[in-house]
Image (cartoon, rainbow, N blue to C red):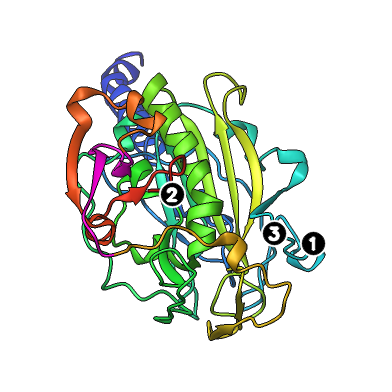
Amino acid sequence: MNATPRKLLPLLLMLCCLFLSACGDQGGQYDFDAVLESAPASSAQSPVEEPGQNQTAPTEAADLNGDTESGGTSEYPIDVNTLPEFDGSAYIEINGNIPFFPEEDKNTQVFEAYSDLDELGRCGAAYANISVELMPTEKRGSISEVHPTGWHSSRYDFVDGASLYNRSHLIAFQLAGENANEKNLITGTRFLNDVGMRPFEEMVGDYVRATDTHVLYRVTPIFEGDNLLASGVLMEAWSVEDAGESICYCIYIYNCQPGVEIDYATGDNWLDTSESSGGEDYTLTVDDGAAHDYVLNTRSQRFHLPDCTGVDDISPGNRSDYTGTRTSLIERGYTPCSICNP
């Protein structure tokens, strides 16, 4: 009577082990699409691309859109129709300057994720936990082959570098090393890129490099209706290790250019001839075609005037002296310092 159970005991133990092993394997796999399916997007809810470079996704994603029906217009955490008109300030604070990140994402798990393009070819949110290991180790390459929605080659003498539009990275190259990623590039004005986004990108980059810590970071382009050009971007950042003490902002940056009228449905544009356009007030440095002396930070890919205070912060291994034109540096992927505006 007792022999049969004893003979079956090893088989039963083996079956239990197999069952537990199978459960463990299943639990160890991260269902990226299921967790991030509610990440903010520019129109109908878009899946988010699994990040490369052996990064891992956040434990949960912020549900900023809420539930939307297939083919419908997704909601943003802000209503662009209630935002004040551009009055000369590049950005305004949103939500008391507190980002919308869920508590469960505020950890040191490194990841980067980019929304798939929607049915109009527009970008959605780009989301990452910025760390030194995510930052580029190679120089930035060309992005000229990417033509984001609303792209036009328009030039005005009073715009820095003359080109109205830039291929604007949602997550800056210096933060995540994404270069010609069409899911990370929108058509942005020079004003959006230089005056609006760059100071906040540099704030995060400088902080992470100096402290070797983490900053939760997300940029969401905001499109009205079926417009091909974003009205602006929602930019959020939160320093993880000190619970936002060093880096904490939630801002909306206007995708505009003082002195230029823009049709956001198509990206078409023309000179604003009104007296209050303010174009000349925001004239930035334009290349005069002559060779000048600059100091390069080969790591952050920024260039400075030799007497700029930012030069003192460049480590000897990352410093390089350069003589040449401003345009040649920009074509090589360098960006002008926001302090000295070379």
Disc 3: CA contacts within 10 A as few (<14), some (14-19) or many (>=20)? some
Structural distance between the alpha carbons of marks 3 and 2: 41 Å
Q: Amino acid at mark 3?
A: Gly
Q: Quadrant of the N terminus?
A: top left
* Magenta segment boundaries in residue numbering: 289-305
- Residue type at tag 2: Phe
**In-front residue for pair 322/95:** 322
Up-down relation of residue 246 to residue 238 (above or below): above
- 291 in magenta: yes
**Residue 332: percent from left, percent from top:** 21, 56
Q: Secondary structure at mark 3?
A: loop
The answer to which of 58 and 151 lies nearer the viewer is 151
- Residue at point 52%, 62% (across, down): 283
Q: Which mark is residue 32?
A: 2
Residue 137 falls in which quadrant of the image? top left
Q: Separation of disc 2 and disc 1 at Cα?
A: 36 Å
Which disc is residue 324 wearing? none
Mark 2 packing: few (<14 Cα in 10 Å), some, or many (20+)?
A: many
Tell which circle, 3 or 2, labels the residue nearer the N-terminal end: 2
Q: Secondary structure at mark 1?
A: loop
Q: CA distance from mark 3 to mark 1?
A: 11 Å
Q: Nearer the viewer, mark 3 or mark 1?
A: 3
Q: Who comes first in sequence, dot 2 or dot 1?
A: 2
For residue 307, side relative to residue 234 (left or right): left
Q: Is residue 286 magenta?
A: no
Name the mark on residue 84: 1
Residue under pointer 3:
88
